[in-house]
Every structure is written in C-alpha cells, then in structure tokens.
Amino acid sequence: MTTRSDHYPQAHRTWRVACIAAASAAVLLAAGCGEKKDGKVASQTAAKVNKEEITVHQINFVLQQQRGLRPEQADAASKQILERLIDQELAVQKAVDQKMDRDPRVVQQIEAAKREIIARAYVDKIGETASKPTPDEVRKYYDEKPALFKERRVYSLQELAIEAKPEQIDGLRAKLAEAKNINEFVEYLKANEFKFAGNQAVRAAEQLPLASLDNFARMQDGQAVLTPSPTGAQVIVLANSRSQPVTLEQATPAIEQFLLNDRKRKLVEENVKQMRGSAQIEYVGKFAEGAASAPAASSTTSPAPAPTPAPAASGLDASSISKGMGLK
C-alpha cells in the first residue's frame, strides 16, 4: 500500500505513529470493545482520507483496549471509532503539511511517549511472571484485616477543618476532650474566633486510609479525634456507624487482585534494583550533589491499590470509592 508517509522522512513517519497513539486516548472515551466474529485478521481498508488509508486493523486495535461494552455494541462502537480516526487523520495530515512534526516541543513529547511505552512494556513483561495467590494466602489476608472484611463498618462522620497555629493544637485537643459533644466544641471555636469549615460524609471501611482504619474500628459512636494538619487541625467525629461485613467469598476476587498486583510491584522493584546495581550511573552537575543519599525511584511502577471488598447489601460499588487506600 502506498501512502503519503512513503514520501516523508522517517522522522515524519515516526511522528505520525506517535500522533495516532496519543490521540487515541480521546477516541477510547467513546469506544467499546469487540472482536471480529469470523476470527480473521482485520487488515482491509475501512476508509480513505485523501491519500491515506484507515484500516479495520486500526479500529480493532482501539477496540481491544476497551472493556465493558457488550458484543452486540461492537459494530456501533467501531463506526464511532472510525469517525474519530478520520478526524484524527485529517489533523495529522494538516500538522505534517505545516511541519509541526519538527517543533522541538512535539519531538520531545514523542520521545517521552515512546520511552514510556517501551518501559511499560518491559515492566508488564516482568509482572507476568508473578504467581497467582493461593486460597490459603487469600484467607490469611482476609483474617489479618478484620476491620476491612468480616468486621467491616460503614461510618457516618462529621469533619471539621480548623485554621490554627502549631502552638494552639494542644489547647484545641484539650477543649475537644472536655466538650460534652461536638456542638459545644464548635461554640468554643466560634467564641475564640477560629476559622473552620465543616463537612459530613459517609465512608465505608475501604474508603478510609488503610493506615488509619484500625483506629477508626476502635472508635465508639460519638467519639472524636483531632489530628494536626498543614493549616491547623482536623477533627473527625464518629456520629454513628453500622456493621456491614464482607464474606471471604465476596472478598476473594479483590484480595487475589491486590496480592497479585503487590507481587508484580515487588518483582519490578527488585528487577530495577538489580539493574541499578549493575549499571554505570553517573550524576552530573547540580544533580551530583547529594545523589548518593537520594533513594532510588522507579517511574515505571506505582503502588498496588488495596483490595476493594465486594459490594455488600448497601449496593457499594467501585465507582463510589473516591479516596483512601489507593482506590479509584
């Protein structure tokens, strides 16, 4: 197949590929998932845009990145993707005509995207060697986190963000302990002209920071805690709570995924550590100052999210979890 890219230098072709890869993110938002039912490799032309061709293979590549849509929605999703690929191709052609591929900022972005994709591919390959957790390992994790599973609670919280100086924190903590209820403490704040903002929220156990979950689990209804914050102090009052346990059967898929992700993370970290140990790395200029004491960091990895308990009777689902424990 002869296309316009045959008439451009290699840098132009690389730029075209990178543009298509980058712009695909917008395409994915409206795309679904699906496969060709006949099992044939899709390589035929789907559309021609001036002298360029968009193939079914390109469309299927985008479709394969998606999750969630039913098979019967694949045809409609394919048509939507094709229209966006056409728009994308028109933009690429116009950008090449205007020599935007030679813009230093564009070149830098292309190289950064290329490095990220290649590094991610290597990390994924290392992670594939991680073994799946055994049933005993899943049960052990379940038993070690009662506040997250079998003793799981849903907490109704009242939060106060108070502006205060560091030397005022101890006094605030003492007044909170003396107060009969949160309203009395609020009146004290008003009387002493503290600036504060209040908020109410309902948080399930998995929506709280994992490091603080055991402390919340020990709290009784009506109890309050004060912790320093960058601008003063935060007061959290447990207005009330209700028990909503998660069974081992419900929690197993989430725990398996968490433990597997954690193993992948550790494998990657160990691999990066080994590569650093055998590589010749020399810091230059201002980066040489204190480099020896700086901790090694890997931009190709991220902490594994904590497991999300399976939906309980309340209808809790992943989309309702907005913070805490690395959940999305």
Image: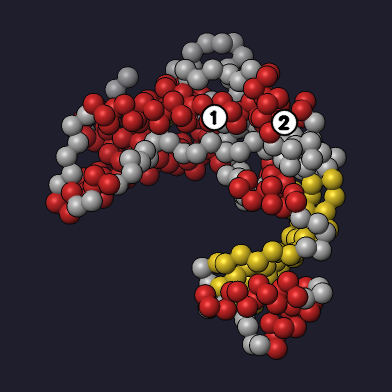
Location of residue 64 by image quarter: top right
Q: Which type of secondary structure does the marked residue at label 2 adopt?
A: helix
Of tags 1 and 2, which is closer to the observer? Answer: 2
Point out residue 323 in the picture as x, y percentages from the top left corner: 62, 51
Q: Is residue 217 above or below residue 250?
A: below
Q: Nearer the viewer, residue 196 or 184?
A: 184
Point out residue 242 in the picture as x, y percentages from the top left corner: 85, 50
- The outermost residue toward the left is 285
Q: Is residue 272 above or below residue 226?
A: above
* Residue at (26% x, 50% y) in the render: 105
Q: Nearer the viewer, residue 205 or 175?
A: 175
Location of residue 232 by image quarter: bottom right
- The amino acid type of the residue labelled 1 equals Asn
Sequence-earlier tag: 1 or 2: 2
Of the 4 image quadrants, the one containing the N terminus is top left
Looking at the rendered structure, which numbered label has been put on residue 143?
2
Contact between marks 1 and 2 (CB within 8 A): the answer is no
* Residue at (72% x, 46% y) in the render: 205
- Give the crowd class for mark 1: few <14, some 14-19, many >=20 residues within 10 Å: many
- The amino acid type of the residue labelled 2 equals Asp
Residue 63 visible, this angle: no
Of the 4 image quadrants, the one containing the C terminus is top right
Q: Is residue 258 above or below residue 286?
A: above
* Residue tagged 1: 261
Location of residue 286 by image quarter: bottom left
Point out residue 130 in the picture as x, y percentages from the top left corner: 50, 20
